[in-house]
Amino acid sequence: MFTSSVVCARDGSPEAQMWTALAGPFFSLVSGALLFFVARIGALSPRARLMTLWLAYHGLVNFVGYVFTSWFAPTADMGRATRIAGATTPLLIALTVLGYAGIRFIARPFGRGVAQLASSPLLDDRAARDWSKESMLYAGLLATPFLALAALPVPHWLSLMYVLTCPLPLFDLPKSVAAHRAASRAAEGATPLGDARPKLAWVITLCAWIVARFVFDGGVRWAS
């Protein structure tokens, strides 16, 4: 019995097994992307937008974490799905490299949104960095041990690694918030995350293209 996973019978068709394995990564991507855009709704209170932004971050960082494990974790969700679909080793390596890039930079597009949701004016770069740390980084670091304990027992070591590594990209966020401080003060009334939307769209498009390429290009070569 696991608290953070669903164990499915593996006697179905290879296609069914592949889509079952992809359910978790795709849910993380879709939920993160939807919440990212919901956070732009002006009708939400600042606190509600900050919570939505936080949940969106976790959805997206979980997805890029799944992609990162494609090559070196063949029994994990993305590893199983890509191998069932007949992905070649170069493609698996490319997915892992793309996932690493996502983990490394996923927090940066959130800088403007976090700056705009500050409870008081960010008068200088130090104030911007402090606000980012208090609202996102420290919250993630404090919550991580409790989330890790709540996830136990886990069916795969990656399940625990996801929890422990989720806050790591947030270390890039203070610099990003400081960089967007002046723009957020000048754009009073602008919707949060407006500057990040094109970047997110490109990331989602690239991920969708890679998935479609190995699944549909020339037909899926189902493994026996």
Image (spheres, rainbow, N blue to C red):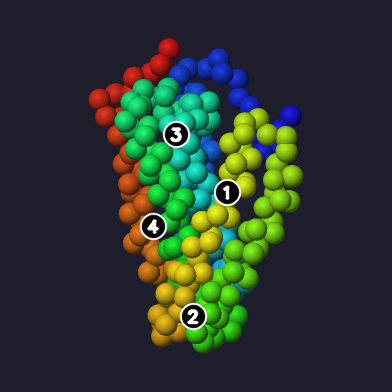
Residue in view at x 33 percent, y 26 percent: 88
Q: Residue furthest left?
A: 218
Distance of label 3 from label 4 (alpha carbons):
21 Å
Of badges 3 and 2, nearer the viewer stands 2
Secondary structure category for the residue under label 2:
helix
Reading the image, the residue beneath label 1 is 165
Distance of label 3 from label 1 (alpha carbons):
16 Å
Q: Quick one: label 4, few (<14), some, or many (20+) residues within 10 Å?
A: some
Q: Determine whether 93 is above or below 224 in the image.
A: below
Residue in view at x 40 percent, y 69 percent: 194
Asked if disc 2 and disc 1 are in contact, CB closer than 8 Å, the reply is no
In the image, what residue type sits under mark 1? Thr
Of badges 3 and 1, nearer the viewer stands 1
Reading the image, the residue beneath label 3 is 70
Secondary structure category for the residue under label 3:
loop
First of labels 3, 1 by sequence position: 3
Residue in view at x 53 percent, y 46 percent: 62
What is the number of the mark on residue 125? 2
Residue 214 relative to residue 154: left or right:
left
